Image: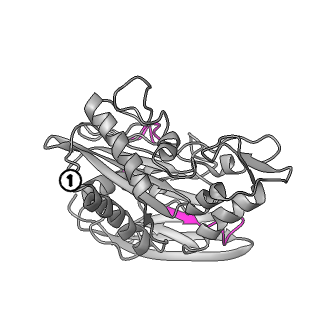
Amino acid sequence: MRIRKNRKSIVSTLWSRKERGNAGKHPKRLKGWPQAFMLLLVLGATLQAMDREGVSEVNRIRQTSGMLPLKNDSRLAKAAYRHAKYLGRLRAQGHTEHPGNPYFTGRTPFDRFIRAGYPTRAGVENISYGDRNYQESVRVLMSTVYHRLAFLDFRIDTMGSSEYGNRRGRIYVYDMAPSTVAALCLRSKKATSERYVKGLCAEKRRRIDSKEFFQALRSIERRSAPLILYPYPGMTKTPLRYIRETPDPLADLYGAGFPISAAFNPAFYRKVHLKRFRLYDAAGERIATRLLSAKKDPHKKLSAGTFVLVPLKGLKAHTEYRVELQVEADGHPLTKNWRFRTGSK
């Protein structure tokens, strides 16, 4: 998927809960891992410092939002750097590499995970194109719908990031994965149950009991808050606009405002029914919006329990907004009201 903003493009694909539920007698490899990309050139001498900067910027948002911080992993950072270099040297775009090119290290993000020494193919890749630093890169990604949800995924707990570029712009690559699934791939025990998943480890035919696989993901999910809101309550300098992406969940809508997302953690909620999701300005006037959900997502990428409210027009600068959310969660009413303030752009 591509995002365009002033000569910048981002590409991304998300793993979906529908794919997660495909474990069984007829296994299907979990696939899709968000990503965004760019071109150009960087010096590798300060790679470790840059790795920490990328993880730190993403963790700043995750922790403020109530999510567990991601651990920095040098193997994922290596995979990220190699792909950023591939894109920069070949002036290419996307998350797919093609054999025969001098900087080829793996066709897909998960192939590159394995090549760099990470035990599992399960994960997510985000890439931003043309940004000046990690702060700007993450800010752009958080102004989308699908890419934001990649950084706020409940199922990841490790990340490696890197950049490659020059003064004209840099490529920022973020590779994220669940360490608990990686641990299942390293142990000697093999699945004996009739229900299993495969294709997630270095040895593609290796089977993992589906029960243990879901427990591994659930152990990560439980370490984050039951509900993640973004913009988070009290957030300031909130961007004003949505940045277009491909596939675009708002293809027919131009000049949309910054998306407001509410994601219910599946470790705490089994079934969530939305009753009301509204946005108001400082004067109490209701803002016209469009709702995205698992049922109303044109590209079927949103998980059940995730709702995104998109203003039809850009938000006003230096303005306070109020959000009202009402749901029925596992048969019980739940209401959340919070405020955030926009910045200058």
Would you place residue 143 above or below residue 223 in this image? above
* Magenta stretch in the rendered image: 246-270
In which quadrant is the C terminus drawn? bottom left
Residue drawn at (71%, 45%), measured in percent from left and top?
206
Q: Main secondary structure of the magenta part?
A: loop
Residue at 40 percent across and 58 percent down: it is: 74
Q: Residues within 10 Å of mark 1 (few under 14, many from 20)?
A: few
Tell me if I can see residue 273 in this picture: no
Residue 178 in view in this figure: yes
Q: Residue furthest front?
A: 188
Please identify the quadrant where the N terminus is shown: top left
**Label 1 sits on what residue type?**
Ala
The spot of residue 180 in percent (x, y) is 60, 63
Q: Helix or strand or loop: what does disc 1 sit on?
A: loop
Given the current orientation, which residue lies at the most extreme right position? 194
Q: Which residue is nearer to you in this view: 337 or 1?
A: 1
Q: Nearer the viewer, residue 256 or 117?
A: 117
Give 88 or 325, whichever is nearer the viewer: 88
In the rendered structure, does residue 261 fall within the stretch colored magenta?
A: yes
208 and 275: which is toward the camera: 208
Q: Residue at x 31, y 57 (%)?
A: 139
325 sits to left or right of 164: right
Left-right relation of 212 to 159: right
Query: Where residue 177 sits: x, y (%)?
Result: 52, 56
What is the x, y in percent for residue 329? 68, 71
**According to the image, label 1 marks what residue?**
45
Decide if residue 175 is on the left or right side of residue 315.
Answer: right
